[in-house]
Image: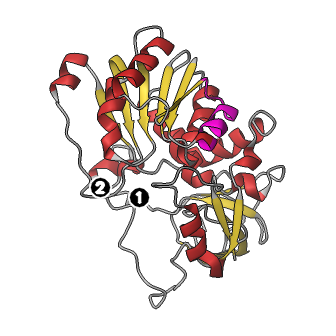
Amino acid sequence: MTHETAISDVEIIWILMFSFDSVAKLGSGIATDSLGRPLKEGDRVAYTYFYPCGRCYACLHKEPAACPHKIERPVGPSTFPHLHGAFADHYYLRPGGAIFKVPDQLADEAVAGVNCALSQVIYGLHVAGVRFGDRVVIQGAGGLGVQAAAVAKDMGAATVIVVDQIPGRLELARAFGADHTLNLKEVPDRKERVKLVRQWTGGAGADVACDLVGFPAVIPEGIEMLRSGGTYLEIGTISRGATFDFEPSLLVWGSKKIVGVIQYDPWVIPRALDFLVRTKDRWPWPRILSHKYSLDKINEAFAASEWHNKETTSITRAALTP
């Protein structure tokens, strides 16, 4: 768990990534979560699944999310203590991590995406500097993009614009606070899309634009949608080797900047849980998690959730239930 060895018994987990568990066994001397709240076996918990080293340049400058060592090379189940993998019915939490009790008023389905995507977009928008009254463009209306729309509105964004090509996703984005949506199929011309964003932002462009889709080809367009002095948040493209063509002088003459973010600091998780409690009647959180699969159906879950090159998909996000 937090300071000692602990094992977690997974309930509804992993929205095809990381999520929350219920405590199967507490380590010796562990009686509270990272905020000092009482913790017992059977409690539901959300936690960091990465471990900043505490000894590198980034960590010593109080930037644990930027630690280059926080994600180690994956090891298989033959390596002690064996329970390393996300797709399993137990997961081992190492000493030194952060763990937080899940509020009782939240349903399992609402908490399933608290790590990725919710905590990720909260931290990303925080780092990008979203402020009250800002105009925000979100490229991609998947799990990251839809939740980013709700978070941006909660942070005080005056205008949130979401770009995608699947109508059902765009409809869900509107339900989660998007003021405008842009369908790539309906507006196929890039210049026209940029023109619409300018129109919806009073002629200036967006204060912050975000890649939450994971295709590098969208990045130049997103940067073009920014106002002079705007910030581009890059979260979506995590695959190494993916590239795009770009003219750097556009950053210089536009006084624009690109911010890359991977994961988040531990303080984000309890704020994400509080956000879910505060907004459980404002946003339709049950609609995020549309399908559940048993652990032995994991390959089917991935195949059914794939949206690339599809006109539509009935799945917004899927969860595994061991």
Q: Up-down: is 168 above or below 22?
A: above
Residue denoted by label 2: 56
Amino acid at the residue labelled 2: Cys
Residue interval drawn in magenta: 168-179
- The residue lying at 41 percent from left, 24 percent from top is 193
Q: Are marks 1 and 2 in contact (CB under 8 Å)?
A: yes
Q: Residues within 10 Å of mark 2 (few under 14, many from 20)?
A: some
Task: Check the image and tell me how it is coloured.
Answer: secondary structure
The stretch drawn in magenta includes residue 151 = no
Point out residue 243 in the picture as x, y percentages from the top left corner: 23, 49
The number of discs equals 2
Residue pointed to by mark 1: 52
Magenta region includes residue 170: yes
Among the 4 quarters of the image, the one containing residue 319: bottom right
Which disc is residue 140 wearing? none
Q: Nearer the viewer, residue 169 or 102?
A: 169
Q: Is residue 275 visible?
A: yes
